[in-house]
Amino acid sequence: MNISQNLRVVVISLLTSALLACSSTTPAPPAATGTVPRPSLAKAWQGQVLIGAAVDEKNIKTQGELIAEQFNSVVAENAMKPMATEPREGEFHFEAADAIVRFAQSHDMAIRGHTLLWHLHTPDWMWQGANGQPAGRDLVLARLKRHIETEVGHYKGQVYVWDVVNEIIDEKQPDCLRDDLWHRVVGPDYVDYAFRYAHAADPAARLYINEYSTEEPAKRRCLVRVVQGLLQRGVPVNGIGHQMHISVFYPTISAIDETLTTFARLGLENQITELDMSLYRWKDNRLYDTRENLLSLQARRYGEIMRMIHNHPDVTAVTWWGVSDASTWLNQDAPADHRDQPLLLDEHGQPKGAFWAVFAAARR
Ligand code: XIL
């Protein structure tokens, strides 16, 4: 560790301790947790905002009761992505996603659809043409149309909101769109087509652009530009999904607030779609304070975010990216000593400080 890194660690720990010292709002769990029944976050927030979790085919079986108790909305963590639903051209597999949909329906939960178009988790056949040649624009668009029509059609009337496109913004590109195969092979209007295909397949579904780091000014500006273009061209876009894979250290609550306000002013809905709050910094395996302090900071910030949501009738759902700290994508492919705890329930499915903070923030 060099001097500047050392300094950063010291500054950050001081900052964390100072923040914790002035935090009078972190709610404590009820004194005798053993005798107090665990409240339901979904019930506490009922009528205010949907409380969601990303789930998979396994945990709806092993943790089904807990999921149904705490959440009233689900999204498939991976099961509705193109790679999962159409692994080979024209061969659709909805078994895993159907199980999640059945689970949700049997518990009266709302269902988000994620996602119809992404630069990742897209099977290679999408880009392959005849005789080993790369596929051209018309072929890729025809494939995209069939994919979207089939998947959205399959879940018509069941999935109420779709992340039509995922992570398409790149603020470093002149047109603000990611330089990926969609852009290279089809051109920038692939976005318009994706929305139009989805709308045709289920006119009642809400259609979203889903994106990460939307609270960063440059990213936000680019997203505004792209969305304004869509709206001007009459493309049926209803809302913005803000992933919010955030950290205990950033972003500020006011940056999130400003982003939500920006899109609400454009007449759009907002949803927080993939919320988790890492104890670490992005792609950095060092813990900058004691776990205990970081978890208290996490609780406090979760409370602040949820209280800020009260000023945002434009926010219709908040979805956490996972059920409990026992399985979070942030621990996938990480070194053994990297143990992130970004969610509301701990490794044993028990409420953390973060859970109580989100509970306390609900209006009653
Ligand atoms: C992640 C899943 O959580 C992982 O299990 C998978 O290996 C990769 O994808 N942004 C998104 C989500 O939009 O689809 C990603 O989900 C996390 C980042």
Image (cartoon, helix red, strand yellow):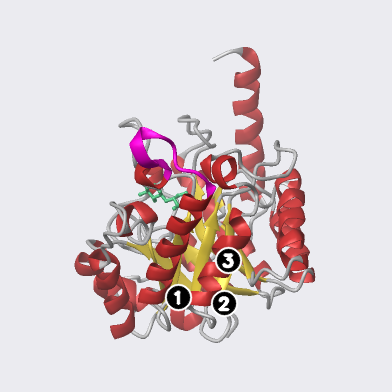
Judge the density around disc 3: few (<14), some (14-19), many (≥20) Cα neighbours within 10 Å: many
Most distant residue in the front direction = 131
Front label number (2 vs 3): 3
Span colored in magenta: 127-137
Q: Was residue 61 drawn as part of the magenta stretch in this picture?
A: no
Residue at 42% x, 42% y is 127
- The quarter of the picture where residue 5 lies is top right
Upstream in the sequence, badge 2 or badge 3? 3
Can I make out residue 28 in this image? no
Q: Amino acid at mark 1?
A: Leu
- The quarter of the picture where residue 24 lies is bottom right
Upstream in the sequence, badge 1 or badge 3? 1
- Residue sitting nearer the eye, 90 or 210: 90
- Are the residues at dot 1 and dot 3 in contact (C-beta closer than 8 Å)? no
**Figure check: 29 above or below 282:** below
- Are the residues at dot 1 and dot 2 in contact (C-beta closer than 8 Å)? yes
Q: CA distance from mark 1 to mark 2?
A: 8 Å
Upstream in the sequence, badge 1 or badge 2? 1
Residue picked out by circle 3:
195
Residue picked out by circle 2:
362
Q: Amino acid at mark 2?
A: Ala
Q: Which mark is residue 41?
A: 1
